[in-house]
Image: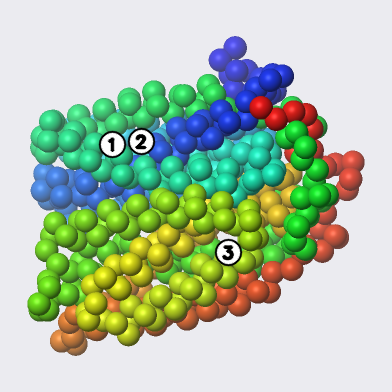
Amino acid sequence: MAVSFLDRSHSIAPPGWSRWLIPPAALSIHLAIGQVYAWSVFKPPLEESLGLSGTQSALPFQLGIVMLGLSAAFGGTMVERKGPRWAMFVSMTCFSAGFLISALGALTAQYWLIVFGYGVVGGIGLGIGYISPVSTLIKWFPDRPGMATGIAIMGFGGGALIASPWSSRMLQSFGTSTEGIAGSFATHGVVYAVFMTVGVLLVRVPPEGWQPAGYRPEAARTGTLITTAHVSASNALRTPQFWLLWIVLCFNVTAGIGILEKASPMITDFFAGTAVPVGAAAAAGFVALLSLANMLGRFVWSSTSDLIGRKNIYRIYLGVGALLYLLIALTGSSSKLIVILSAMVILSFYGGGFATVPAYLKDLFGAFQVGAIHGRLLTAWSTAGVLGPLIVNAIADAQSAAGRSGPDLYRMSFYIMIGLLVLAFVANELVRPVDPKYHEPAEDKVSAGTGGEK
């Protein structure tokens, strides 16, 4: 009975079900798994209590991001087949279990258990949870896919704004010894399990043939890239459009995460030795501003894409982003305001790129297996998660060894990011409608739905 409750057939919405209950269901998952961006809170106590280096304490986070991309890629088709309730339950189980395993690792001073629990088991929960609501949201909101996915994915960006102070308070309450860290991990695991269960219970899929009242797919085709046909996940991998978007997402994320991963030391280095140096508290405030920009960009820009089109919004992300990187490189330490505002806009584009790409995929490939296609595309995130920090850190280390300081530590990195954004801009320009030879036969198409809106 418990297993059948998770089946797709048992999560079909009854007549009169409000589609506006689906975004809160998605948010309950994304706000939870967005905790991954707050992992840095646990780094100092782990380093102190277990004698770890900074590189070692970062391993659970890095492995979690890698597993996010891999589990989303390999589990995407299963998520489509089994439905969002099953996917959210698996995400909740893995993410919470990851914390509980990590608690055991901290309690017994076995760091490999923390790496395995948070990085591997929890990372699988991250990936399955990240893609779990995407296809369902697009099917419930075919008239506003950018807004719908933006609401959910905004939660992932904003999860750290909740988790960071909450985790800090947990460590203050339980202490920063191995026992205290174990207590914090265990509390996280239990609370997140309860919170994510809300999404499991709320989520529904629209009945076959459902559409919002007054919505006509043909009338909604306001751009040449928007299709009413359907492409399977396996066929999508054979199209140039998929790989062009892979390049677009990878390089846009690389450019954003390059700032995000090193934000605190970067802003400190930039203005060190000037009349207006940046202290630790101000650097922490800068990181908070970037997190806020990342979160808001996911909703604002993805909603804007419903009005101006997906290709146009990526022209803004990539073109304006490259110009802002150039502005930071040329401004250097002469204007703190320009550097901070430019970095915030770049981070809003970073978040917006994540939130807009599911709708871009739906435009190109239809709603048939958009969740599975999205999962495969997230391997670009895994790649960028390694590429961005590697570029910034390696160049900063080399410049520091050469005796340089201030903005000179990062200027070359910025020029590389500009080059990557230009390449992504070109890739976006090359996106064309998918060749009909990749479309599913008409009788095999899975309807995105007809019926009334609530």
Q: Residue furthest top?
A: 1
In the rendered view of the protein, which quadrant contains the C terminus?
A: top right
Depth check: give the residue in front, 274 or 402. Answer: 274
Q: x, y (%) of residue 389? A: 34, 67
The residue where tag 2 is placed is 98
Quadrant assignment, res 1: top right
The residue where tag 1 is placed is 102
In the image, is 411 to the left or to the right of 65? left
In the image, is 223 to the left or to the right of 148? right
In the image, is 119 to the left or to the right of 218? left
Neighbour class for label 1 at 10 Å: few (<14), some, many (≥20)? many
- Residue sitting at x 37%, y 80%: 327
Quadrant assignment, res 206: top right
Mark number for residue 64?
none
Q: Are marks 2 and 1 in contact (CB under 8 Å)?
A: yes
Q: x, y (%) of residue 49? A: 11, 44
In the image, is 291 to the left or to the right of 184? right
Q: x, y (%) of residue 352? A: 49, 57
Neighbour class for label 3 at 10 Å: few (<14), some, many (≥20)? many
Q: x, y (%) of residue 37? A: 33, 49
The residue where tag 3 is placed is 313
Q: Would you place residue 33 above or below residue 433 in this image?
A: above
Helix, strand, or loop for circle 3? helix
C-alpha span from label 2 to label 1:
6 Å
Helix, strand, or loop for circle 1? helix
Q: Would you place residue 175 above or below residue 193 in this image?
A: below
- Residue sitting at x 13%, y 30%: 174
**Residue type at numbered disc 3:** Ile
Q: Is residue 311 visible?
A: yes
- Residue sitting at x 32%, y 85%: 330
Depth check: give the residue in front, 316 or 353. Answer: 316
**N-term-proximal mark, 3 vs 2:** 2
